[in-house]
Amino acid sequence: MTATPTVEICCKVPLTDRIILATQEDVSYPPQRWRLTNGDMASVEVEVAADKIRHDYATYSVKGKDNYFVNSRVEHLRVMLSMVNVSTDDFDRLNGKHPTADVHRAHLVSRTTGEGVDIDYQDAEVFGKRVYQEIREAVNHVLEIIRDVYGQHWLKLLVDEQSTQNFLDEVRATYRFSPSAEWKHLLVTPNVASFGPVGVGGAKRFLEISDWIAMQTAVDSGTRPNLVLTLLSEANERFDRGDKQLAIIHLSSALEWAVTTYLEAQLASRIPKKPLDQILDQSHGRLLEDWVWPLNGEVGTGITQPEWQAVKGVQKLRQKAGHIFLSPEIESLADRDFQVLLVNSAAFIQRVTGVQQLKRPFPMLGISRVTTG
């Protein structure tokens, strides 16, 4: 049986919340390329406002040095898929040659000329769902790394909440049979409808080209961010949205994971497994006082007083966060105070486990507080 050709997909995914790029002289962010879980190749590229970044760099850089107080937003990700093992059934549907598939008609209107054209196509919903899921997998893998490892906690992952065709229309999905140069609008189900801001911050806190290039290793390996980084991002995001109680719960969970990991590493060679498990079953507060702090002095972990005070502060707030009614201590917790807890907790986690959040953007660079112009 003759193998069907590879099907290439191209689309432009709008981001609900923007990725923040550092403004640098170099504006080349090469595509991230890797194999998805099913073996198809994916490529994700940030759509960079190159002219604007060059202008900002020329305007705001000081003696040729990068200025990290002016940063640019990414509003879209460009995604390319190279899909293999496309079934003969799907291939025939895409070509309009399936003997029994329903035929539909779509009226497409050009965004530039306003002229319309009628296109006949065959139902290919199974293939469309495969494309939808692969785009989500590719985009979410990149967003998850930027969110959790590089600290851009406001980023939201794509969720499966739209109909397949509505999503494909939104991202302007097109396809072609490689190596053909003819791109066609991807229509798979009936009822088809027609279809420069700046973030101000400081320091090297936003996504740089070196970060984007370094991400390729994680993207290619399929490695997801460490759970503790996800918890830190969730804590930051929840507080940013006003859910202070859940923010404290997430932050406490991150610290509890770090304490357990630290004690297992320090005590596994000294204490048999069963007694060690009994120790680890003790309360978080007791583990801190009876084990973590004494070990810090014994082995020289280097936990600082600000870090220790933050850990103890989170523990105290966590005891109040489990109640139905919001405690006055949590309700009155200000942004600045929470950031002190978060920053020192993250430093504590890095010190005892080695797990590091590589960037920590300013908290005000959340949803609506960063737009200007």
Image (tube, rainbow, N blue to C red):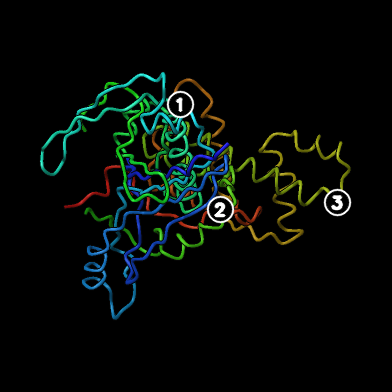
Q: Quadrant of the N terminus?
A: top right
Q: Amino acid at mark 3?
A: Ser
Left or right: 178, with 218 as reference point = left
Return the residue nearer the eye: 132 or 145. 132
What residue is pinned by disc 1? 126
Left or right: 114, with 78 as reference point = left
Instruction: Tell me the CA gap for discs 1 and 2.
Output: 27 Å
Precedes in sequence: disc 3 or disc 1: 1
Estimate the x, y position of residue 202 in percent, counting from the top left.
Answer: 34, 62
Q: Residue at x 10, y 42 (%)?
A: 113
Estimate the x, y position of residue 225 in percent, counting from the top left.
Answer: 56, 47
For the question of whether residue 364 can be seen, the reply is no
What residue is pinned by disc 3? 269
Residue 220: mark in rendering? 2
Estimate the x, y position of residue 307 in percent, counting from the top left.
Answer: 56, 53
Q: Amino acid at mark 1?
A: Val
For the question of whether residue 292 can be seen, the reply is yes
Disc 3 is placed on an element classified as loop
Disc 1 is placed on an element classified as helix
